[in-house]
Image: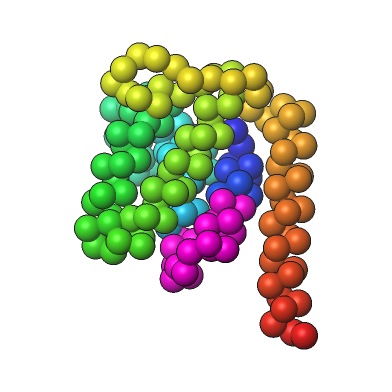
Amino acid sequence: MLFRTHIVFSLAVWFVLNYFLVMPIYVLFFVLLATVFVDVDIKNSRFGNHWFFRPLQFMTRHRGVLHSLVAGILLSLVIGAVSLWAGFGFFVGYVSHLFLDCLTRGGVRLLWPFPWKIKGFVRSGGIFEQVVFVLLLLGDIFVVGKVVLGYLF
Ligand SMILES: [Zn+2]
């Protein structure tokens, strides 16, 4: 899935959670951080194109260990040890990224180190993803607009 699709989806997930939970606003930062972090295992991703991720990319494969629940849980626990809400947000962002990637044809080894791949029918960057992206973007804009209007009137 594309960077922008992960962003609009994670934002939508946060909106839904924020409706039910009373969360500090910085949780959103960690949701978005995690959702872009997962793709550091690929050189040409938005986050992974920095030279300092090369050693990490050398040690991992794209959609390998970093695209697994094990990595998501471990990293979230480390961050959660500092701040529970931050760890929670990171976990939410991580899982939302993995969820979308599970829908793609490439699939994800969600239960790494086990070899089973969970995959769907969506082609990364294809027409289905573009439609989902636009719908999510419109949904996000609608919610933000509603909040802004709520403050103004
Ligand atoms: Zn990914």
Dominant SS type (magenta): helix
Front one among 48 and 20? 20
Whole-percent x and y of residue 64?
A: 37, 25
Q: Residue at x 61, y 53 (%)?
A: 12
On the picture, is 88 further left or further right than 143?
left
Whole-percent x and y of residue 74?
A: 26, 42
**In magenta segment, residue 77:** no
Asked whether the viewer can see residue 34, the reply is no
Whole-percent x and y of residue 30?
A: 42, 57
Q: How are the colours assigned in the image?
A: rainbow
Q: Residue at x 64, y 19 (%)?
A: 121
- Quadrant of the drawing holding the N terminus: top right
Task: Establish if 120 lies above or below 87.
Answer: above
Whole-percent x and y of residue 137?
A: 72, 51
Q: Residue at x 29, y 45 (%)?
A: 75
Q: Residue at x 41, y 56 (%)?
A: 89
Magenta-highlighted residues: 11-29
Front one among 96 and 46? 96
**In magenta segment, residue 20:** yes
Task: Establish if 91 lies above or below 132.
Answer: below
Task: Establish if 89 lies above or below 51.
Answer: below
